[in-house]
């Protein structure tokens, strides 16, 4: 129970307005005035004033008989999300990936022609791959890079290719724009990327996209494993599912739908 002085600090109209917004749901997409009053426990006159105020502010629309929320209410949630650090949101998801797979999990973004490691949750295995936050690697040779490049527009990809040095780092590294474009088409279609010894001999990696509320890929989350311990089938069957669960979870928290690169 609130103290009297706490009650005095509350703005009743604001509280009722928020209650009205929360009364709408996928079960109650549209409500009449009577339904809105019943859902919030308010009188019809009070519910009417609140709905008209929300309509005036652009949060509610009406067809004359029923009321519904407008997309502007999403801005209330986005303001919160934009105040959060991406690493704060992804950290618990990445920790669960490490627990499920036994492999270190990394988050990276695209900077010019490189991927930059934003954060990493390591595993404690002696044979684990060591990568530090801030590490830069060429995008064309990494699964993280392929995920990030696959979301670029045609113009953005053209600019990338005009600057990128597609030098071979191993015998398996992609060397031409045509090869890279073909790979990115596959990544875009399947929604994830795998690189097999293209960055370093003996190293295989897998990555999936993290999307923001607008559906754009803002980061990539990935796992790396040694080919001596995990074959390609095991990567797809054992590492990919926990990774996709994590990236879908982060994307959902950021306001995006399920993480499928082909669905734009």
Image: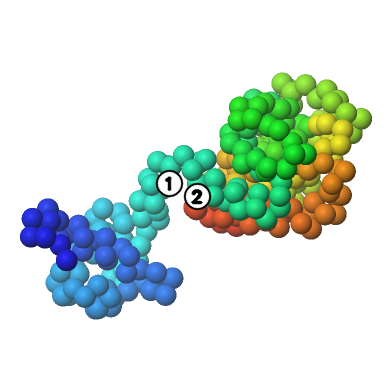
Give the numbered dot on residue 81: 1
**Label 1, residues with CA under 10 Å away: few <14, some 14-19, many ≥20:** some
Residue in the image at 77% along x and 21% along y:
165
Disc 2 or 1, which lies upstream in sequence? 1
Q: Is residue 135 above or below residue 5?
A: above
Specify the quadrant that holds the N terminus: bottom left
Residue 69 in sight from this viewpoint: yes
Q: Is 97 placed above or below 181 here?
A: below
Outermost residue toward the right in this view: 171
Q: Secondary structure at mark 1?
A: helix
* Colour option used: rainbow
Of residue 48 and residue 141, the one placed in the foreground of this image is: 141
Q: Please give left or right for residue 48 compared with residue 32 in the image.
A: left
Task: Please tell me in which quadrant of the rendered image residue 3 appears.
Answer: bottom left
| Residue underneath mark 2 | 254
Query: Which residue is painted at 66% across and 49% down in the image?
Result: 98
Task: Kindly identify which numbered label has been placed on residue 120.
Answer: none
> How crowded is the residue under tag 2: few (<14 C-alpha within 10 Å), some, or many (20+)?
many
Q: Secondary structure at mark 2?
A: loop
Query: Quick check: marks 2 and 1 in contact, CB under 8 Å?
Result: yes
Viewed as shown, does residue 218 lie left or right of 139?
Answer: left
Residue 104, visible in the rendered structure: no
């Amino acid at each position: 129970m609130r103290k009297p002085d706490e009650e005095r600090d509350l703005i009743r109209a604001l509280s009722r307005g928020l209650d009205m917004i929360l009364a709408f749901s996928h079960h109650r997409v549209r409500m009449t005035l009577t339904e809105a009053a019943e859902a919030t426990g308010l009188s019809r006159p009070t519910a009417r004033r609140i709905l008209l105020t929300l309509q005036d502010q652009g949060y509610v629309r009406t067809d004359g008989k029923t009321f519904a929320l407008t997309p502007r209410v999403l801005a209330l949630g986005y303001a919160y999300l934009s105040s959060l650090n991406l690493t704060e949101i992804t950290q618990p998801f990445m920790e669960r990936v490490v627990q499920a797979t036994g492999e270190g999990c990394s988050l990276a973004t695209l900077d010019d022609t490189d991927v930059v490691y934003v954060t990493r949750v390591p595993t404690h295995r002696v044979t684990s791959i060591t990568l530090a936050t801030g590490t830069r690697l060429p995008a064309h040779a990494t699964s993280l890079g392929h995920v990030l490049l696959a979301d670029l527009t045609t113009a953005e990809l053209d600019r990338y290719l005009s600057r990128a040095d597609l030098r071979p780092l191993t015998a398996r590294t992609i060397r031409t724009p045509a090869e890279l474009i073909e790979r990115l088409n596959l990544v875009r279609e399947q929604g994830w990327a795998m690189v097999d010894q293209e960055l370093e001999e003996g190293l295989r990696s897998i990555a999936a996209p993290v999307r923001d509320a607008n559906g754009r890929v803002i980061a990539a989350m990935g796992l790396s494993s040694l080919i001596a311990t995990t074959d390609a089938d095991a990567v797809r069957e054992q590492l990919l599912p926990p990774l996709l669960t994590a990236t879908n979870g982060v994307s959902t928290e950021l306001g995006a739908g399920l993480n499928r690169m082909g669905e734009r």
